[in-house]
Amino acid sequence: MARNSGSRPVGGPALTIGVRVLVRRSTAADLTGEVVEDYAAVTDPGGGGHAWAPVHRWAVALDDGRLVFADTEDLTIDPSSYRSAPNPDSTGRTPGRHRGE
């Protein structure tokens, strides 16, 4: 049975690279973007972080073009980015030109 945690809705996607998220910071409005990198290996004890400059686990490319770094507790999966069932009309291709066309 799926559990509801702060970073993932029941039955929804896990927090991984490529997932759309809301970045919640106490000093600013929520920002939306996509997770582009997971630095879990360097956030573990002995992984290379410093007490005076802690490493944040996730790199997020914001929709406004900025890159921010956040911890898991700062992120919530964007509920508008997933559906309960795939769209049967979707071809899975991005718009634009493709090689060989």
Image (cartoon, rainbow, N blue to C red):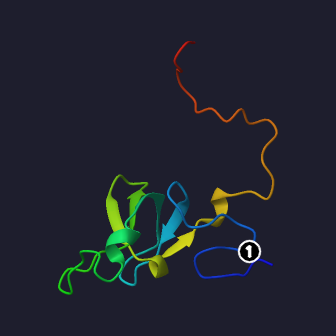
Using the image, determine if residue 89 lies above or below residue 23.
Answer: above
Using the image, determine if residue 87 lies above or below residue 31.
Answer: above
Using the image, determine if residue 3 lies above or below residue 65.
Answer: below
On the image, the x and y values in percent for residue 30 come to 47, 72
Q: Looking at the rendering, in which quadrant would you find the N terminus?
A: bottom right
Q: Looking at the rendering, in which quadrant would you find the C terminus?
A: top right
Instruction: Count residues near mark 1 (Cα–Cα under 10 Å), then give few for <14, some for 14-19, many for 20+.
Output: few
Q: Residue furthest front?
A: 46
On the image, the x and y values in percent for residue 44 come to 36, 79
Q: Is residue 22 left or right of residue 82?
A: left
Residue occupied by mark 1: 10
Viewer-side residue, 64 vs 12: 12
Say what amino acid the circle numbered 1 marks.
Val
Q: Residue furthest left?
A: 52
**Who's the residue at 17% across and 85% down the image?**
52
On the image, the x and y values in percent for residue 63 come to 43, 54
**Who's the residue at 32% across and 57% down the image?**
66
Q: Residue furthest bottom?
A: 51
Viewer-side residue, 20 vs 47: 47
Total marks in image: 1
**Who's the residue at 47% across and 77% down the image?**
72
Viewer-side residue, 43 vs 33: 43
On the image, the x and y values in percent for residue 94 come to 58, 33
Q: Is residue 33 left or right of residue 51?
A: right
Task: Give residue 82's quadrant in the image.
Answer: bottom right
Viewer-side residue, 10 vs 48: 48
**Who's the residue at 68% across and 73% down the image?**
9
Label 1: state its secondary structure: loop
